[in-house]
Amino acid sequence: MPFASIRLVTDDVDRLVAFYERLTGQVAARPAPVFAQLGGPGAALAIASTQTVAMLGGAVEPGANRSVIVEFEVADVDAELARLQPDPQDVVLPPSTMPWGNRSALLRDPDGNVVNLFSRPPA
């Protein structure tokens, strides 16, 4: 079974799409005003309005995530964080080398979801 996507549900699709377009350098596909998708090799990041999950009766709540980290592999973590210039209060972890060798920086997107920019150690 192929992995297809992660979907972030939000009250403000345009704001979240703008954040991830800036982060990835991609332009999101917008088949409808309530939905956007950014693609990459292997999977996609979908961004959808709460209107798209209304039939789930409150099972999905925007901005309440405290267990998922959206991860992007980058060539240079420090350079990417400098390029993005996030508000210091949105930085969860400044660029750091993890015990397993990855270099990571964690920040929050506009809805509070944690985003990990990481690079692998040189081989």
Image (cartoon, rainbow, N blue to C red):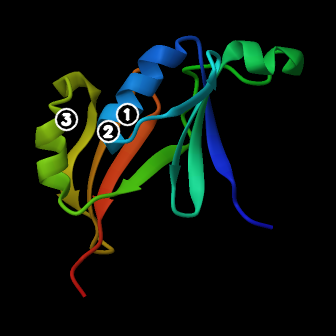
In this view, the mark in front (1 or 3): 1
Asked if labels 2 and 3 touch by Cβ distance under 8 angstroms, the answer is yes
Kindly report the distance in space between the C-alpha atoms of the residues bearing marks 2 and 1.
Answer: 5 Å
Residue 80: give x, y in percent of width and height: 18, 47
Q: Which residue is mark 3?
A: 84
Quarter of the image that includes the N terminus: bottom right
Q: How many marks?
A: 3
Type of amino acid at the residue the image marks with label 2:
Leu
The reply, left or right, for residue 56 in relation to residue 19 is right
Kindly report the distance in space between the C-alpha atoms of the residues bearing marks 3 and 2.
Answer: 7 Å
Q: Quadrant of residue 82?
A: top left
Residue 43: give x, y in percent of width and height: 59, 56
N-term-proximal mark, 3 vs 2 = 2
* Residue 23: assigned label: 2
Label 3 sits on a secondary structure element that is: helix
Which residue is depicted at the point 65% across and 48% down?
5
Label 1 sits on a secondary structure element that is: helix
Asked if labels 1 and 2 touch by Cβ distance under 8 angstroms, the answer is yes
Q: Is residue 109 above or below residue 13?
A: below
* Residue 52: assigned label: none
N-term-proximal mark, 1 vs 3 = 1
Q: Which residue is mark 1?
A: 21
Q: Is residue 47 above or below residue 51?
A: below
Which residue is depicted at the point 42% across and 35% down?
27
Type of amino acid at the residue the image marks with label 3:
Leu
